[in-house]
Amino acid sequence: MSASNAVTDTSGGHAVSNPYFKDFASALRYWRDKRGFSQLRLSTVSNISQRHISFLESCRAQPSKELILKMGVTLDIPLRQRNQMLLAAGFAPAYQERKMSDPELESVRYALNFMLAQQAPYPALVVDRLWNLVMSNEPALMMIKWLLDIPDSQPVSTEGLNVIKMMLDPSSLRPYLVNWEHICADLLHWIQREAMSDGPGSESTLLLQELATIPGVQSAKNVPNLDTRALPFMPVTIRKNDVTLNLFTSITTMGTPHDVTVHELRVESFFPADDATAAWFKLKAK
């Protein structure tokens, strides 16, 4: 089987593309190397003999479903990729991938709405692994409207909105990001990490290629912040007209979910880095 072949999902008979790994052995070798595990160390941690791991990686032995799930936990493999490893070995996926509108995720939506509300009067966003906007609070929408000169009475359509594209697009938010080059390097790091997991032909790889075509991104993606005084989080400086906002962001993931969709959600919260910025958002909230 070539690396571009599809693997059959035995749970429903649908062909699921797995462009990165041609078989389970390739996937196991990749994730073991990525996590810096020797076969001996993986054997010690997982309590599986080194001989058996060697046989698995050379296709001389076939894994059980339980072994694949155990390797997924031991090597901290993303749930989406654990499903791909199961499919490559001929098993059905173990982790569901549901839409956020699914009734079974009502408690997740409630928790996220609670987190977004608690962040007010400062912005907060919920994005998926490709940084497509899933949810946001009112301060986040207010800031976007302010920057893009959208009237307060006009609703903002968030359907299909990609936060990274907005921040790097010269015709969108980028002109107002004073330190956009450093932000660019940080944001691309997230997508590069997803692309390394998913491989060629995946959504994340295609997004990375699309971002690379945005003017200025290629030269900015390799601009690290080498200032020794740099904060241990991403600072964001926004300037429009005579207003300068100094913020920093933190990214939160959901604890230990068993659903692919929930596992890939990111909550990005913006915090004021000075009194003037805090006062501006509090005034806007009135």
Image (cartoon, helix red, strand yellow):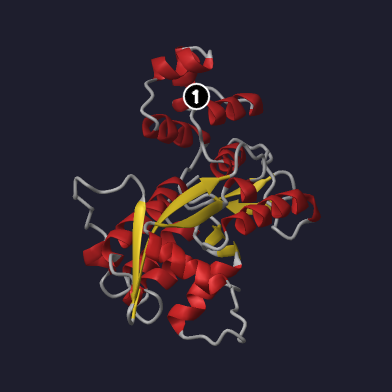
- The percent coordinates of residue 32 (x first, y second) are 42, 29
Nearer to me, 80 or 59: 80
Residue 170 in view in this figure: yes
Count of labels in the image: 1
194, above or below 87, in the image: below
Residue 188 in view in this figure: no
Q: Which residue corresponds to the image point at 41% horizontal and 17% vertical from the top-left?
A: 41
User: Image quadrant for the C terminus?
Assistant: bottom right
200, above or below 36, in the image: below
182, above or below 39, in the image: below
Q: Which residue corresponds to the image point at 69% horizontal and 40% vertical from the top-left?
A: 92
Q: Which residue corresponds to the image point at 51% horizontal and 79% vertical from the top-left?
A: 145
Task: Check disc 1: other Cα within 10 Å, few if <14, some if 14-19, many if 20+.
Answer: some
Q: Is residue 160 left or right of residue 239?
A: right
Q: Is residue 21 left or right of residue 192?
A: right
Pointer 1 residue? 56
Outermost residue, right side? 103
Nearer to me, 1 or 204: 204
Q: Amino acid at mark 1?
A: Leu
- The percent coordinates of residue 183 (x first, y second) are 33, 60
Q: Which residue corresponds to the image point at 23% horizontal and 53% vertical from the top-left?
A: 224
Residue 83 sits in quarter: top right
- The percent coordinates of residue 206 (x first, y second) are 43, 63
What kind of element bears circle 1?
helix
- The percent coordinates of residue 227 (x first, y second) are 19, 50
Nearer to me, 253 or 203: 253
